[in-house]
Structures are given as structure tokens and as C-alpha cells.
Image (tube, grey):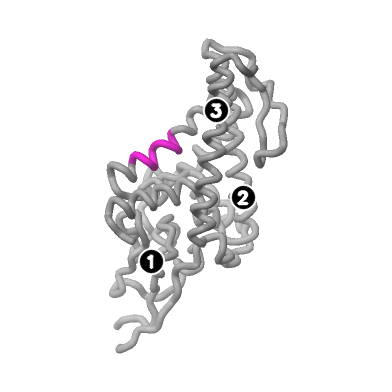
Amino acid sequence: MASKRFAAVDKTICVACGACEKACPLGAIKVHKGCFAKVSEDKCVGCGKCEKVCPANSIIMKGRENI
Amino acid sequence: MKTKKKHWYDYLWIWSIVYFALGFFNILFAWLGMIDFLLPIMLAVFGGNKFFCNHLCGRGQLYCKLGGDFKCSRNKPTPKWIASKWFRYGFLIFFLTMFGNIVFQTFLVASGAENLREAIKLFWTFRIPWGWTYSGSMFPDWAAQFSFGFYSLMLTSLLIGLIVMIFFKPRTWCAFCPMGTMTQAICKLRNRVK
């Protein structure tokens, strides 16, 4: 079953540092071509670890719409 | 839960400490910092990625260790303006200007217009005598002048990073790191992302 929440990245403020990639226990978030972080929404369980480490405040947890 | 596989490059925070320690013994080691300067740019230009920031940056790992594992960070959100575009690019321009200044000083010493100054300058303001790390070498004086300048820049930015680490998040420095801003800009241009 999919989790209630997932991480959403604001691409316009992401600095592509990779802190989230290191923090993610599931490998669900990766820096895409050095531009911004990309979340695999089906892998993400919404734990919020990436949100906590993001130095640019570009990650927020969002609720999934239809579960 | 499965633990992530450790790579050799997960220990590069040691390199960061070694680099700054070496500068206390012989300033010419400061040249090694050029690796941290050129490698990210090469990876961005030729690879179109931020592999350096994401995996190889010893400084980022050091902040993670100190701020995360050793809890030396308040872990408060970075103020918005620090991660804003104008501040990031403004800081990049300031940083490059200061780097240009170092190159110019090096040129002045090379041409004989100025003498070698055996001191480092912290925060572009405070001059600290650093003469014990240099007493002549087989290299010309300008090589030492560049070392003193470059080491000052590296130490100053490390200290700024440590200060923002304590106040905000461990890797707040990454939000406005000039190398990070530059490599991200290169990647965006290369991959045509707005």
C-alpha cells in the first residue's frame, strides 16, 4: 500500500547538493543531471528525512491524493 | 531496513581535515585545494552532473558529520534569502572576484612589483602571520603567494560554513557554496533546464 505522504521538491529552489540523496533510507530521491532532486513517488514512504536535511528548504511533504 | 553500501568516497571528510592540517605545516600544500576547485567544474562540463557535490565533496561530508552525527547544529531551517538566487549568484560573483584578486596578487609577486607576504587573511579582513609554514623552497615566490591567498580563501569559506552549520542545518553552506552554484548553472545550461 502506498504511504499517505510523499516528498515533493521545488525544482526552482533546489541547489542539487545531494544531501537528501544521502539521507534517504530507500534511495527514492536522486539528483537529476546536476539540476535538481527528483523523487520516485512510488518508492517514497514520506518519512521526511530529506525534508529535515535539505539546506535550501526545497522539500516539503505532501499528502497523496487518491489512495 | 537495509543499510546503504559504503563507498571509498564516503570517507572524504578525512581529506578535508587533512587539507587544512597540512596548511599549518607547509603552505604549499594549499595548491592541492585546486583539485576541489577544478574537479567539480570538469565533472559538470564533461559529465553534466554534480557527482562532486553529491558524493565527493569532503567539506559537505564534514559538515554532515559534525552537524548531523555529532549534533553540532541547531537544525533550524536555512533563512530563505540565503538560498535565494540573487544571494547565491551574488556570493559566487564576490567569491570569483576575490579569487581574481588572489591571482592578481600572485602576478604582482611574480613580476617583482610586490614582495611575498607570509600571512593569511581571514574573512578578507583579518591578517594573521603564517610565516612558519614557509621558509623558501625550490618553487618561485609567486607559488607561495598563491598558496597563502588560496589557503585564506579555503579557510574563510570553511569557517563561514561552520558558522551557518551551527545556526542552521549541517549543510546550509551547500545552499550558497560558490562551487555548487557554478556547477549547477553549468549543468542547467548543458541540460537546457530553466
- What is the CA distance from the residue labelled 2 to the residue labelled 1? 26 Å
Q: Secondary structure at mark 1?
A: loop
Residue under circle 1?
A11
Q: Quadrant of the rendered structure where residue B27 is? A: top right
Query: For this rendering, which residue is in front, A65 or B1?
Result: A65
Q: Quadrant of the rendered structure where residue B44 is? A: top left
In percent of the image, x 63 and y 45: which residue is there? B159
Q: Do callouts 2 and 3 mark residues in contact (Cβ within 8 Å)?
A: no
In percent of the image, x 67 and y 34: which residue is there? B121
Residue under circle 2?
B162
For disc 3, the chain is B
Q: Secondary structure at mark 3?
A: helix
Q: Quadrant of the rendered structure where residue B170 is? A: bottom right
Q: Where does residue B48 sit, x and y in percent of width and height? A: 29, 48
In percent of the image, x 31 and y 43: which residue is there? B45
Residue under circle 3?
B104
Q: Do callouts 3 and 1 mark residues in contact (Cβ within 8 Å)?
A: no
Viewer-nearest of discs 3 and 1: 3
Quadrant placement of the C terminus of chain B: bottom left
Q: Where does residue B12 sit, x and y in percent of width and height? A: 46, 42
Kind of residue at badge 1: Lys
| Residue density around tag 3, few if under 14, some if 14–19, many if 20 or more, within 10 Å | few
Kind of residue at badge 2: Leu
Image height of B112 relative to B118, above or below: above
- What is the CA distance from the residue labelled 3 to the residue labelled 1? 38 Å
Viewer-nearest of discs 2 and 3: 3
Image height of B49 relative to B103, above or below: below
Asked if the stretch drawn in magenta spans residue B36, the answer is: yes
